[in-house]
Amino acid sequence: MSITVKICGITRVEDAVAAVEAGAELLGLNFYSGSPRCIPLERAQEIAAAVSGRAMLVGVFVNAPVSDVLAVARAVPLKLIQLHGEEDADDLRAIARHFPVLRSLKADASLAAAQPAQFANCSGVLVDTSTAQRGGSGVAFDWTQINWTALRRSIAPAKLLLAGGLNASNVGAAIAASRPDAVDVASGVEVAKGIKGAELMREFVAAVRAAERQLL
């Protein structure tokens, strides 16, 4: 299987270019003002111009008005929208008319109760650690405690994305447990908050590719 690599929380043009060169296919840009990785529209446009045609940009939003999400997505431009808040079904439906939507879920008791109707307008579902932060916590969860088969049935045909404290050292075990369609890393490839390390990104992608081979 081929696992897509998403590097999230990109804040600099040089980091975006290095991420693409390392082999990342998706780059996450954060537009949530409560995140230390939040960037202004102008910076996002600079990043978009630098990697145009080489990677798809994902915009991360938390409880933002639909009109704001769509305006930013068109202005950057973004390819996918990742919702990390408590957006309701109407919000998902409205955004999905224009852009593919990735929905974030916390890896807690609520995950087992997830119902297929929740994901009717989602192109992907991202399972992340349950923390007070809206992603990027650097904290992993116990991947073996999730019924991944049942979750896949609930979200189908949406893709399964795995996040939460991933790094080059643990992503292989995470992939073996969950067999995701994509993995999402932020703090696990950083040398400082919001600043990516080129070598760390290369190591992460290499670890993902090694884990892929083990699944064959």
Image: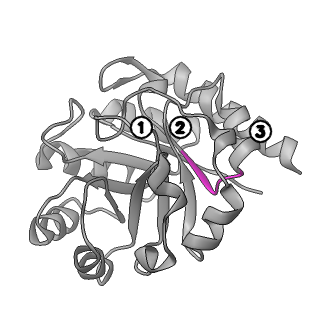
* Number of numbered discs overlaid on the protein picture: 3
- What residue lies at 26% left-to-right and 54% top-to-bottom? 85
Magenta range is 179-183
* Residue 211 horizontal/vertical position (percent): 77, 38
* Residue 57 horizontal/vertical position (percent): 37, 55
In front of the other: 194 or 155: 155
Check the image and report above or below for 138 versus 60: above
- Callout 1: helix, strand or loop? helix
Label number found at residue 17: 1
- Which residue is disc 3 drawn over? 211
- Callout 2: helix, strand or loop? helix
As measured in the structure, the alpha-carbon distance from the residue carrying label 1 to the one carrying label 3 is 24 Å
Q: Main secondary structure of the magenta part?
A: loop
Do labels 2 and 1 touch, CB within 8 Å? yes
Label number found at residue 197: none
Do labels 1 and 3 touch, CB within 8 Å? no
- What residue lies at 36% left-to-right and 65% top-to-bottom? 79
Tell me which corner region of the image, top left, top right, bottom left or bottom right, holds residue 212: top right
